[in-house]
Amino acid sequence: MVGEDKSMRIRWRVLGGDWHEIETNVKTVGAFMREQGLSIEEYLPTIGGKLVTEDEEIKEGIELTFIPVVSGG
Amino acid sequence: MAKCSVCGKPAVYVAKYEGKAYCPEHFLEWFDKRVRKTIRKYKMFGKKEHIVVAVSGGKDSLAAMHYMKHLSKRVPDWKLEALLIDEGIQGYRPVTIKDFKKWAEEWGVPYRIVSFKEEIGATLDEIVAKGHELGLPYQPCSYCGVFRRYLLNKAAKEMGATVLVTGHNLDDEIQTFLMNIMRHDTDRLARLGPVTGISEHDGFVRRVKIFYDIPEKEVVVYSMIHGFYPEFVECPYARLGFRWDLRHYINLLEEKYPGTKFMIQKSLLDIVEALKKEREGEPKKCKICGEPATSDVCRACELRMLLGLMEPPKWFDVKSIKI
C-alpha cells in the first residue's frame, strides 16, 4: 500500500554493551536514536566502524553501534 | 546523507551550532584550525618549552597527547613528555593505563606514572572506604580531584615541566563552572579558564587546556578518525558525582538549543575575568608540604590529615579544617 511504513529488522548496541535485535519502521539513524532515548549529544552513531550522521538511512539488517561521548573518567 | 560543506563528500559529523557538515579530512582540518587558534589566543606556549601532557588513557587526554605530539614536530625547541596519575581504581585504571602505554610507546612519547598509593599513602578505593568509615561527607570525585591536581603539579615540577597540558574540553569547563555556581564556590570559580595556575608562584606549573573551545563530542570524532578511540570502560565512581547529572542536563539543552555550551563559556570567561581582578593577591605555599595553596595549608594535606594518612604538625588543629 502506498505510504505504508515498512518494518525493518536491525541490530544495535551501545559500545561496551549487549546487542539488541529489533524491528523498527523509522527511516533515519537520528529518528532511531530519538526512539531509543539516545541523545545525539551523548552518542555518536557508527555503522561497520564508520561514523555516520543523523540523517543516514536505516536499511534492513544494518548493525548500529553508538559510541558514548561521555567516557566517565 | 549529509554532505561535507567544504568538498561535498559524505559527511561524518554535523556541527549544528554553525550549520556545517564535515567529511573526515575536512573535520580534521577544521579541528586543527580551532585548536591552533585557541593556543594563539590564550598564548599557551612559548618558543622554548618543556611540555608535559597529563594523560589518563581516556579519549580526551589521549587526543591531547596525540595532538601535541604532532604539533611539537613543528617546533624544534619543544620537549614533550606525558604524565599519568594512577589513582588505584580497580577494574578501571589498569585498562586505561594499558591503552596509555600502548599509544605513548607507538607515538614515541616518554612518560612517567605516579600513583596515589606511593605518593598519598592509599589508593582511591582505599581512600573512599576510609572516608566512608570515618563518616566524611565527600564523594569519591572530591578526593580524586584534589589529590590528582596536587600530584600532577608536584610530578610535573619534578619532571622539569614549564607547562602542563590537560585534555579538558569545552564540556568539562562549563560543567565545572556551573557546579561551582550551584555550590556557591566563588574561590574555585575564579580559578577557571584556559590557562590556570599562578604564574608568579615558583611552585606552580602553568596549566593549559588546548581543547578549551572544542566540544567533547568533537574530541571523540578526532580520536575515532585517527583510530585510537580507547576501549570503553567507565570509572565506577563517575555516576556518583554531581557532574554526571549536570552534564546530561546541559546536553539536553544543547540538543534543543545548539550553541548553548559556547554561550555558557562566554559568560564563564567574563565572570572569571572579573573575579580574578577582584581577588588578586599574594600566592601562598602550604606550610606543611610547600605546594601552592590558597590558604596556610593546602587541601591535599587537609584531606590526608582527615583520612589519617598524615600526622598533623603540632601547631595545626585538625578540628580547624572546614568540612
Image (tube, coloured by chain):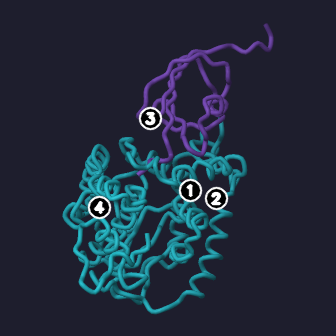
Chain colours: A purple, B cyan
Q: Is residue B168 left or right of residue A29?
A: left
Point out residue B136 in the picture as x, y percentages from the top left corner. 38, 60
Per the model, the C-alpha gap separating discs 1 and 4 is 23 Å
**N-term-proximal mark, 4 vs 2:** 4
Contact flag, marks 1 and 2 (Cβ < 8 Å): yes
Asked if badges 1 and 2 are on one and the same chain, I answer yes
Tell me the crowding category of disc 2: few under 14, some 14 to 19, or many 20 or more residues within 10 angstroms, Cα based.
many
Dot 2 falls on which chain? B
Which residue corresponds to mark 1? Answer: B215
Asked if badges 3 and 2 are on one and the same chain, I answer no
Q: Quadrant of residue B127?
A: bottom left
Contact flag, marks 3 and 2 (Cβ < 8 Å): no
Tell which tag, 1 or 2, sits nearer the viewer. 2
Amino acid marked by disc 2: Lys
Which residue corresponds to mark 4? Answer: B84
Asked if badges 1 and 4 are on one and the same chain, I answer yes
| SS label for mark 1 | loop
Which residue corresponds to mark 3? Answer: A15
Dot 3 falls on which chain? A
**N-term-proximal mark, 1 vs 2:** 1
Which residue corresponds to mark 2? Answer: B261
Residue B77 visible to an observer of this rendering: no
Asked if badges 4 and 2 are on one and the same chain, I answer yes
Q: Is residue B99 above or below residue A59?
A: below
Amino acid marked by disc 3: Leu
Per the model, the C-alpha gap separating discs 4 and 2 is 29 Å
Q: Nearer the viewer, residue B278 or A9?
A: B278
